[in-house]
Image (cartoon, rainbow, N blue to C red):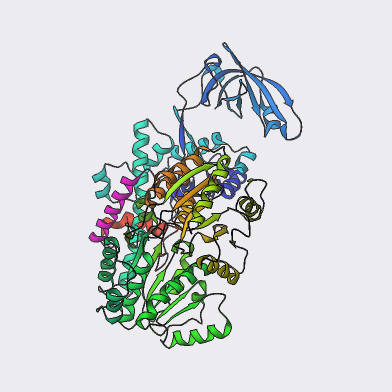
Amino acid sequence: MTHWVDTGIEYLKGVGPAKAQALKAELGIHTVGDLLSHYPFRHEDRSKIYQVNQLNGEDVYVQLQGFIQPQGIVGMGGGRRFVANFRDKTGEIELVWFQGYQYIEKSLKPNAFYQIYGKVNNFKGKLSIPHPELEIIEGHTPKSQGILVPVYPLTEGMRRKRLDNKFMVSICRVAVSSPQFHIPENLPIAILEKYKFLSRKDAIKELHFPSSIARLEDAKRRLKFEEFFYLQLRHLLIKGVRNRSYKGLVFEKVGQYFTEFYNNHLPFELTDAQKRVLKEIRADVKTGLQMNRLLQGDVGSGKTIVALLTMLLAIDNGYQASIMAPTEILATQHYYSLQEWVTSIGLNIALLTGSTTKKKRTELLEKTKNGEIHILVGTHALLEDHVQFEKLGMVVIDEQHRFGVAQRAKLWKKGQVVPHVLVMTATPIPRTLAMTIYGDLEVSVINQMPKGRKPIQTLHRAESMRPIVMDFLKKEIALGRQVYYVFPLIEESEKLELNSLMNGYDVVTSYLPTPEYKYSMVHGKMKAADKETEMQKFKNHQTQIMIATTVIEVGVNVPNASVMVIENAERFGLSQLHQLRGRVGRGSEQSYCILLSGNQLSQNGKKRLNTMVATNDGFEIAKVDLELRGPGELDGTKQSGILDLKIADIRTDESTLIASRVEAQKWLEFDELLMKTESAPIKYELNRSPHRTVWSKIS
């Protein structure tokens, strides 16, 4: 039997076929339930009526009552607008419409008494209210009910069809006032009682049309918990399915390769954090369950050596390993780093990328298939069907947010028995985001840098200080150091007014001329072989300055490079700035990151650059980045569909997120398969959810 919330939106009073089509096309609202789940993003307090002489030009929303006198259409072309005067007993203010003014002009009644609501605009001392909300008051008595009026997310398409917030308020009020209004409960009684939550029906009604601010907060608290609870529950269900469905490989011994490398070939002493992570991994691979672990570590914290030791565990137990990176540059960098280490203990390693020749590819594929290759390093090329292993036991995925779920799963399925999986990221993830996106993975963090590393000094310099910056580069180069110089674009962009790479090169060489100073240049449009040639010249000290775009964000390890200059730094996100900074500071000498910007900065631009100057802590930087950009804009999350949160916010609702995780874990301990009567509300919700299929066997 179809529930009332599944009724088509066109059948709700006040909607009809035409408006229903707009709701479906613009907002994805197909049913009454969809409408009630289209939550308001704020509420306006309509309890106060202002008078015109009380307006002081501040950028605030106000409610006024009085009369409107049309003045007509003024201006030409794109500046055309319709203007009217609003007056009450204390004065006048201009009302202006830039769109839909033909309709407004026809509908205004000169002698009617209006209640208007809008945002006061102050342009060169003249006050106006653009596109105010209008309501005729019969008998000078407002028709609007309630003092807290919901404001809904709308699209320009909705507004063009004159389906405004007033329309949304109207149909939502019809829905919650219907005799059929009922929302099935989706939280167990035990959780409702423990947290003293409103029922789902009451919470949704109060969220749309709160009877008080306190009840509005109660509604938000309940609905935020609900969103997080199901997000966490799905992660834990995926993990449970994986553990029940797939037997993990058991790596019982620490054998000759691990022991030989650890005792005799470690390039540096491991930090306590690296040792802790290795213990966590060793514990995982003994359990008989498939390991799925996320390894977070700041740029230069030593994740690669941990990944190698993890792969050596697999090899000691008779299995092969692979490591997949998102770019040829990074895959090649891994290959050279690992090759130097593993050949010393008698292991075979190979590199497979899109640039691998046909002859070489055929040879290494055969060796991989018969088990001669112990470690295969590569890019997306590893995902091709003809890449087969004899016994794949460990998969390492680097910068994993750059791979889609389906791509990762494809590599994961190449083993005859499911291999253990270690996913790594050098982009630190705040705790709340990690819990939200990677809730089905165990998480390890390397939060120490190798001994002997000096903290990078980060400096912000405006364009006017360019000569001083260039003199500093000359001094560093005179000391035998090398310099990265990064530009944001390769082509000119008038819109963004950024320096292109080529113009930037001309600027730099005007201060540091050739042939006295030698340059490498790398950008995204170069062939992989040409990029590698340029990078190797820089790495081998044949050049002193690397001019590049953000292609060098990951994958270049030159300990002698002591300065990173980032041009137009205000145009970069915090995460990218931090990644770029991590290209220096890899040797024992003091290193510097210089953020060059325009003289005028936005508020967010200032905060980003000030944060970079203030801290080298990647997790602190990630936290600020999350606050500034929001979770949906961070790498790998926007397209994932995981963060489709309607009301909860991982930036501000951490305590609710943690509580929901705890309750989801407790509930599955109580009823792992959701078969008990008490789990009926949960099963109902999961069956209705668009995520009802298990998303993937790997995250």
Q: Is residue 670 magenta?
A: yes
Q: Is residue 213 above or below residue 545?
A: above
> Which quarter of the figure is the N terminus placed in?
bottom left
> Which quarter of the figure is the C terminus placed in?
bottom left
Residue 599 location, x and y as percent? 57, 38
Q: Is residue 377 magenta?
A: no
Q: Nearer the viewer, residue 339 or 151?
A: 339
**Magenta span:** 653-675
Residue 540 location, x and y as percent? 51, 68
Q: Is residue 227 above or below residue 389?
A: above
Q: On the rendered structure, is 678 left or right of 385?
A: left
In the image, what residue occupies the spot 25% across and 78% down? Answer: 254
Q: Nearer the viewer, residue 312 or 221?
A: 312
The quadrant holding residue 505 is bottom right
Chief secondary structure of the magenta span? helix
Residue 236 location, x and y as percent? 32, 61
In the image, what residue occupies the spot 66% across and 45% down? Answer: 495
Q: On the rendered structure, is 607 left or right of 230?
A: right
